Image (cartoon, rainbow, N blue to C red):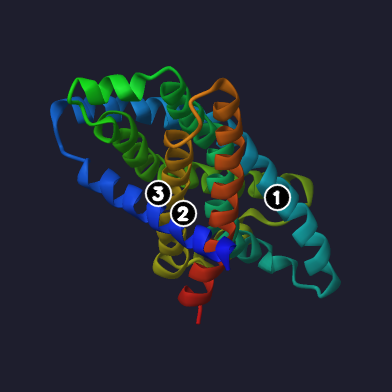
Amino acid sequence: MAGMIGSLRALGRAGLFSLSVLRASLPTRDFFAELTKEIYKIGARSLPIIAVGGAFVGLVLTLQGYRVLAIFGATDALSTMLGVSLYRELAPVLTALLFIGRAGSSIAAELGLMRATDQIKALELMAIDPLAKAVAPRFWAAVITVPLLTGVFCSLAISGGYFEAVHVLGQDSGVFWSTLRNSVDFHDDFGVALWKSVVFGAVGALTAAYVGFHSEPTIEGTSVATTRAVVNASLLVLMLNFVMSALMFQ
């Protein structure tokens, strides 16, 4: 019972923290300056791992899918399987997990270090809201960049799948693209990937920021907070993916 009450209290504190971040997101000049900086730090610098991950996911998904579809003589549906599985599930989830590992850990570590070195208290003493200065720009940068990174992931995965299917497995190029175009719907597939990536980016950034912002003011506390942020955010993304898929594909 005590554990359940503690979990509810933690959930309530996280909810109040999220509301405080939204309330602190005022469109000022300083905010947009910090936002631009954070988009580069957590978005542009995440491009290499997202691009490489997307390419190899497309390659292996095409290879394994071709072997399964060949059993039923349905290899022409290879691009359908690739496109639908990527847009609906794999691309937003894997992009979010890679983003959390690359940028979420950075957010938690930076905020934890600010807590350990009393930078957050210094901002408060100067009558500067630390949420507006340090948290809100990182949150909105994640909301903006994760959908864009998901698009990059999808593009590289489809390109990798095309290379594997056409140049390695010998499938006809026209069949690959025509089947993909006829099977992927903008609203049901691409729209789902967009909405999921927005939610996953927001949840990942808020979780990392909350854990880092409330970490113990020590170097060890920063280390623990970074690990906890990655684990908690990754689990939340996986759970939310199931919930959103269940609601969207009834």
Q: Is residue 98 visible?
A: no
Q: Position of residue 8 (x, y in %)?
A: 47, 62
Q: Position of residue 44 (x, y in %)?
A: 44, 28
The secondary structure type at the circle numbered 3 is helix
Left or right: where 45 falls relative to 97: left
Question: For the residue carrying disc 3, how many other residues have a C-alpha within 10 Å: few (<14), some (14-19), or many (20+)?
Answer: many
Residue that extends furthest to the front in the rendered view of this protein: 2
Residue closer to the observer: 147 or 203: 203
Residue closer to the observer: 126 or 247: 126
Which residue lies under the disc numbered 1? 166
For residue 156, what is the image quadrant? top right
The circle on residue 177 is: none
- Alpha carbon of mark 3 to alpha carbon of mark 1: how far? 37 Å
The circle on residue 202 is: 3
Question: For the residue carrying disc 2, how many other residues have a C-alpha within 10 Å: few (<14), some (14-19), or many (20+)?
Answer: few
For residue 187, what is the image quadrant? bottom left
Q: Disc 1 residue type?
A: Val
Q: Position of residue 207 (x, y in %)?
A: 46, 46
Residue closer to the observer: 80 or 49: 49
Q: Quadrant of the N terminus?
A: bottom right
Identity of the residue drawn at 20% across and 26% down: 128
Q: Is residue 168 visible?
A: yes
Q: Disc 3 residue type?
A: Ala
Which residue lies under the disc numbered 2? 10
Marks 2, 1: nearer the viewer: 2
Would you place residue 71 above or below residue 119 in this image? below
Question: For the residue carrying disc 1, how many other residues have a C-alpha within 10 Å: few (<14), some (14-19), or many (20+)?
Answer: some
Q: Earlier in the sequence, mark 2 or mark 3?
A: 2
Q: Earlier in the sequence, mark 3 or mark 1?
A: 1
Q: Are marks 2 and 3 in contact (CB under 8 Å)?
A: no
The secondary structure type at the circle numbered 1 is helix
Q: Position of residue 149 (x, y in %)?
A: 47, 41
